[in-house]
Image (spheres, grey):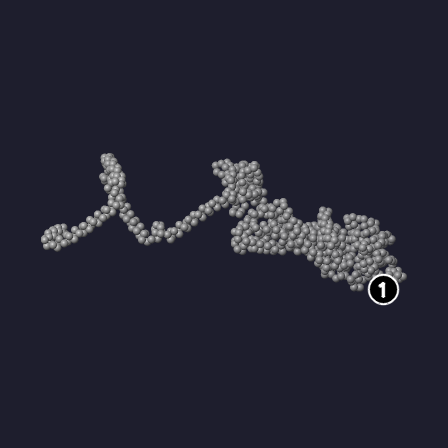
Amino acid sequence: MVAFIKEQFTQAGKFSFFIARFFRELVTPVFQFNEFVRQCYTIGYKSIPLVSITGFIMGLVLTIQSRPTMTKFGAESWLPSMVSLSLIREIAPVITALICAGKIASAIGAEIGSMKVTSQLDAMEVSAINPFKYLVVTRILATSLMVPLLVIIADLVGIYGGYIGYNVHSSISLMRYFSDVVEHLDFIDLLPATIKTFFFGFFIGVIGCYKGFNASGGTASVGQAANSAVVTASLSIFILDMLAVQITDLFF
Amino acid sequence: MQEQPIINIKKLTKSFGKNNVLRGIDLTVNKGNNLVILGRSGSGKSVTIKCVVGLLKVDKGIIDVFGTDVTKLNYKELNKIRLRIGFLFQNGALYDSMSVRDNLAFTLKHHTKDLPKEEVEKQIIEALENVGLEEAIDKMPSQLSGGMIKRIGLARTLIIKPEIILYDEPTAGLDTITGKEISELILSVQEKYKTTSIVITHDIICAKMTANRIIIIKDGLIHVQGSFEELKNSSDEWVRSFFEYE
Amino acid sequence: MENKIIKAWKLGMFVALSLTVFLVAIYFIGKSQNLFGTTFHLEAKFKNVSGLQIGNNVQLSGINIGTVKEIEFVSDSIVMVNMVIRSEIQQYIKTDASATIGSDGLMGDKVLMIAAGSASQEIVKDHSLIKSTEAVGMEDLMNGLKKSIDNAEIITKELSEFSYKINNGRGALSKVLTDEEFSKSIDRTLQNLETGTDEFVVFTKKMNDKNGSLSKVMTDPVYARSLKKTLSKFEKSAADINVFTAKLKNDKGIVSKLLSDEKMANDLDSIVTNTRTATEKLNELEEAAKHNFLLRGFFRKKEKAKDKMEANKNH
């Protein structure tokens, strides 16, 4: 039991060192710009379809599901603003982050893990290329910056999905719908939600890289790294979300 | 020139946990020489050369390369030394997300930023010609056979024109004929670029072909060293057992 | 290389698109809170802001023109509300404008409503204080509403009783509404009334005729005087009648006795009965006399004279 707890603390310590190393390597010169752009493309652009589809469905379904209750209270006209508020504040960030945890964290974990076990990381090292800088820094930075952008896309598409959902039973013009949405929005709705997505992205990248970087042994550990990256990243997203909501609640 | 030591290792110890892998290795490689290290699996041969390039941190001892102790260098200085050392991994360790061309260009571009494209291309082709695989330039590593991967791996180390090449089991997992081809390649590279090499192998044929001198490691210490013929006719039965299948 | 250029282009498009969406959202939210563009400030003092919050809309004629920026106490019972309003609206708000706190729908947010003021006044200046009308709170509204509802309840109760009586009762109104006979009689009455009015019209015409006696009565002073005299005599006689009736009422008078004494009334009754009996007997006697031969001639003569009279009449 003691050994188990000690092991957990060791893991936490290693993880903290990993994050510290990221920031150290981030500020020291030679930034792998090309690799960063390539990762942004893979992580950001390639995830647009997936994120858009989930965002659209969330908006549509949320509108259709909320309608009966809202109608009961005679507040059907509040549907656009309510749906868009819940999308922007909570659903789009969390769902997008979870999708990215599934798609990106696992890919990073598997990629770096396989590079590790086939000594490609060592090969880089001996060619005087810092694999941490080349692989880890670029990926973490790419996820940190791309996930918020993906969330914005998900917000937009989700709100549009809400519009379609609203028009299933009644009709409203797109212009009216969006002005209704914007009218009830506040910076308090948009900014904390956007800030927390940076953290989501950061942790998706960090956990994916960490699990990959610490894969050891045979090819089995690659699968393990990918799996554990997804699980840990998803869990951390929920924990981060809870913290973010509490902090937001505290200050505003 | 003949007796100028390039690599000089003194009292090298390294342990993983409670497992003392190296317990005081002393060895010297002179310029232009090929040193072959023999030993059973897990005897610490690979660990030794990984310590030389700084992939592993040594516990104690001195590793003197080009007259500087690599164990005392910081990361930046170590990288400068690393650029003068080639390292061929056991499995080739090609970057499997990149084509052969990008694999070769990767290191080159990384260290010579303002090299014109044509020059990069020229050097890639030259390196591939050295290993006889020009036609594989646009292939992905997954499309290559084991022997080809080893040769591309060698080409990748050659492209930075290293003064020392460290081979980690270059013939492992290959058939005898391909193994011989690789051994010949090692020799021809050495002829051409006047490199100093350390070859780690179990393969006696490879050792016979490439070695100027052979070291056998046992229990983390150098058990015996000498030329191929000397060791083959050694009075030690354990040493002679390495040469049984020649 | 070709591949890389396309990638960079796609990535750039993605980044640009999402950043644009974000900035547009920021802009629109900011616009709805008047963070951009020129604005001016107005202040109003209230005793009770009924839950108005910072960021609530300010409306003029039902249009959102700004937001509430600050709400703070200036003394223990007065709250100062500071609002930010778009500059282009300034020209419509005059110095006598007043602010009221209302609400946006039954469950909606509070809004600060500004009445623009009269056109003749000057335009408000930045940071000036405008009048305020105390808000009608939800509680007041509910209290008023309750009173009205109680009253309405009583009224409807009575109304329902009333209509029940109409439908089932035997009162006059019921008859009016339900009895056919009655309606016919009313119809007749109305016809009579019509005739009456027609005649009245003729009468009034006559009355208006200058030579008519009534007209004379109305206009001629001589008549008037004589009429006055008559009236005063009439008055006097009425007074006499009064005295007479007073005496009449008095027990001792015979007429009074006649009217009020029961015993006398009984006597009178018996007298009348006796008289009737006597008359009957007399009639019988007369009949008997007719048949008597002695008197027959007399009766025959009498009859003839009667016939003769009737014959004359017919001619």
Res. B146 image quadrant? bottom right
Query: Number of callouts in the render?
Result: 1
Instruction: Name the subunit of mark 1.
Output: B
Camera-side residue: C104 or C116?
A: C104
In the rendered structure, the answer to whether residue A25 lies left or right of residue C270 reads right
Res. B242 image quadrant? bottom right
Find numbered disc 1 in the image and state the secondary structure of the residue it sits on. loop
In the rendered structure, the answer to whether residue A163 lies left or right of residue B209 reads left
In the rendered structure, the answer to whether residue A88 lies left or right of residue C241 reads right
* Vertical comparison of A239 with C242: above or below: below
Camera-side residue: C192 or A227?
A: C192
Q: Is residue A164 visible?
A: no
Position of residue A139 measured from the top left corner of the image (x, y, whole percent): 69, 52
Q: Could you tell me the amino acid type at mark 1?
A: Glu
Q: Is residue A27 visible?
A: yes
Position of residue A223 measured from the top left corner of the image (x, y, whole percent): 70, 58
Q: Look at 75% across and 54% down and name the residue there.
A: A3
